[in-house]
Every structure is written in structure tokens, then in C-alpha cells.
Image: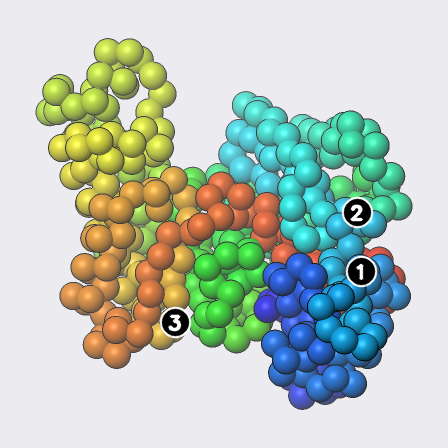
Amino acid sequence: MGVCLVTKTSKFDSAYLRRVNCVKTFCTIREHGWISRSELADITGLSRATVSETVRELLEREFVREVGSDNTQRGRPPVKLEVNPTRFYLIAVEIDVGWIVVAITTLVGEILVQRREEFRTHDYDFVLNLCVSTVDRLLRQQSIHRDDVLGIGVAVPGQVDLNRRVVTFAPNLRWRDVSLADDLERDLNLPVLVSNEAMLGAMAEKWFGRGRDAGVLVYVSVKGGLGCGIVNDRSLFLGVSGSAGELGHMSIDPKGPECSCGSRGCWEVYSDEQAILDRAFRALRTSKDSLLFQWCIVENRRLTVDDIVHAANVGDQTAMEIVRESGWYLGIGIANIVNGLNPDMVIVGGCIAASEIVFDEINRVVQERGLQIPAEKVSLVPTGLGDKVALMGCIALLLDTLLEQPEGRLNTDSVREN
Ligand SMILES: [Zn+2]
């Protein structure tokens, strides 16, 4: 089931229905591999005529293809359909503080190749050029022609004005009002869509992850900052200007420490990766028998959240306490989300999500502080997409936008402000 990120159609007009049917049909073909038209109708609940019309459109666009037939039935065997695995390619780019990852995928979402590049600068032009050269390099390496690439999706840890296609504020990258989508389009000569990484995380979970069947889904991204993406039914909730989901900046202590946003006591200040690392550095002063002390002080290694989770998983008491306290703060914010939005699923991503202790604590706090009905209804789970969440979100965004458009290649003019 797809997520409509940008739609200018109303919920009840024919364009909306066409898009919903298209996404439903494409996703069902993708999930089932080989499937006949009549099986598609049974699974999607669409009429045979609608399936036939939608499949015709997908065949014309070469997004799906007909393969073989089912010889087990008598009479004329029905032709099977599958997503065309080699006709077109999509490119996903994830930008974060100090690194980028570029991946080329098929329309099924299978990653064919990916490359990570690291850097030590906040300079926008440097990062832009690095994205361009890495995409160029991978295309050459895979001998993929630009004409066969339908579009590039880019995930950034910041707020994106989807109409102006501008990254308005990415505090950890120190970027303000940069025209990333237009600049990449100009330099790569390919259509580009840019979005917030947590919103893309929610899309990834809805398209490829554990949230496929969720009606109301919240994805919580715990990284250098803390952001959320909210999917309601089949649509990403954007708010008036596209910045909905910045729940990391909900204040959980009005007199708490200052946050990068200018407010005080934001949830992010207690719960993002820096907060978890700061908790570890404070604990090290008095925990000389901890594995973390050994790694960080004795061996002079740069401590990561992965290290802390690993130490907690092997029973290091200091690490277990750090992880438990981090889970408590995550639980406080998630309990607020559960009370406020009544989701059926909250999915947490980031290194910290690999810890069972964190989820025990989140579950405990949500049951303790959440209102009874929403707390009973919600399932709280870690992402199953690992560190590929944002990349898969880029692919989901591209597929969703492509399927929304009636024909041809990705047209980024349609998502600009009229
Ligand atoms: Zn804040």
C-alpha cells in the first residue's frame, strides 16, 4: 500500500481513485512476485475491469511485465505479472552529518549497489558536489544509462519546504534555505525529490516495512536529532507547510536545557544520539569497570550509540542503565504521541532501536503514562529496515510520486507550487 506524499487531488475525485488503484495494484504485484490479473482482483478487492485498466497502464509504462503462464489450470493459462526488474532504475541519496550514502535500486526496491562517502565539513557546495560525483560514479560503474533512471530521492535531516523544494533548516548540517532539489537536478540532469528523513522513514515502513497494514503509523527517527513521520491511512501527514512531525521539539520540560531550535527542554535534548552519548560520558566518570570506560578512555576509541547498545546487550551494567534511561525518555515522548494521535503502530529507527532494554522501557512507560485505550491499541516496534530506512523511504517517495502521475517519467514540476 502506498503513501501519497504530495497530492493536489481531493479524496473523492477520479484522479485520486486512479492513483489509489494504481498504487494498490503495483504494490500487490511487487509483494507477490508472479501474480495473475484474477488473483490481483481477489487480493485487492478491485473489480476485474479496474484491474485490467490499471494493469494496462502499468504495462504501457513498462513498470510491470507479463511473464510465462500458470500451466496447472486447464484451458487458456492466465498470464502472470511481475514488476519489471531491469527496465528502469531509481536512485536514493541519504545525507547526514559527515556522510552520504547513494544507492541504485530496481523498481522492486532491491538495492543493486550502494556507496558511502564521508566528509568533515558543513559546506553545502562540497556536499552537493559529492552527491553529484557519487551518483555519476555509480551509474558509470553499473553501466546504467541516465534515460533508464526515473528519478532521484534525497533524504535530509531537516525541514523541507516541499512546494519550494528547498531545505529550509537543517540545524545539524548548518544549512538554511538551500535549493538542494533544483541544484541536483541541474547538475545531474535527472528529476529529484527531496524530503525529511523521518517522513521518508514513515513512508519506508508503510511501503516496505512493518507498517504495511497500519492505519495510523508514526515513525520515530532517533539519530543526530529526533524527528517523526506520521502516516494517516494512505497519506503522509504534512501539515500546512510540510513540517509536521517535528515532535522532537515538543517540550517535555519547560525549564529544561536549551535546544538547537531555540526552545527549552525539547524531547530531542533528552533522547537523540547526542543525549545518549552525553549520558554515557557522564556515567564514565564513576564507572571505571565498564566496557565503555575500557573502549573510550583506555583504548581512546570514539564511542558510538552502537557501542553502548552492544555493551548493554552483553550485560555491562553501566551501559544497561544508560540504555534504560534513554528508553525512559523515549517512552515519555512516545506516550505523548500515543495519547495525542492514537496510532496503531509506533516504529522506532536508529541504532538505539536495536536494544531490547529500550523497548521494554518504552513499553513500560507507555502503559504507565498513556491513556488506557490508545496505550492498549498501539504496538511499539523497532524498524525492521535497519540502516536502510531512509534509502527505502526515498524509493517509496519516488514510486508513490511516479504512480500518482498519469504517464511518462517523474515530473517534478507537478510537485512545485502553482
Ligand atoms: Zn527544540
Q: Which residue is mark 3?
A: 343
Q: Which residue is mark 2?
A: 86
- The answer to whether residue 371 shows anywhere in this view is yes
Going by the numbered disc 3, the residue's amino acid type is Pro
Is ligand 1 within 8 Å of the beta carbon of the residue shown at mark 2?
Answer: no
Q: Nearer the viewer, residue 121 or 68?
A: 68
Q: CA distance from mark 2 to mark 3?
A: 37 Å
**Residue at horizontal 88%, vertical 46%?**
147
**Residue at horizontal 21%, vertical 53%?**
361
User: In terms of image quadrants, where is residue 203?
Assistant: bottom right
Labels 2 & 3 near each other (Cβ < 8 A): no
The x and y percentages for residue 378 are: 32, 69
Labels 1 & 2 near each other (Cβ < 8 A): no
Q: Nearer the viewer, residue 178 or 9?
A: 9
Q: Earlier in the sequence, mark 2 or mark 3?
A: 2
Position of 29 relative to 298 (above/below) = below
Going by the numbered disc 2, the residue's amino acid type is Thr
Q: Earlier in the sequence, mark 1 or mark 2?
A: 1
| SS at circle 2 | loop
Q: CA distance from mark 1 to mark 2?
A: 17 Å
Q: Earlier in the sequence, mark 1 or mark 3?
A: 1
The x and y percentages for residue 195 are: 61, 53
Q: Which mark is residue 68?
A: 1
Is ligand 1 within 8 Å of the beta carbon of the residue shown at mark 3?
Answer: no
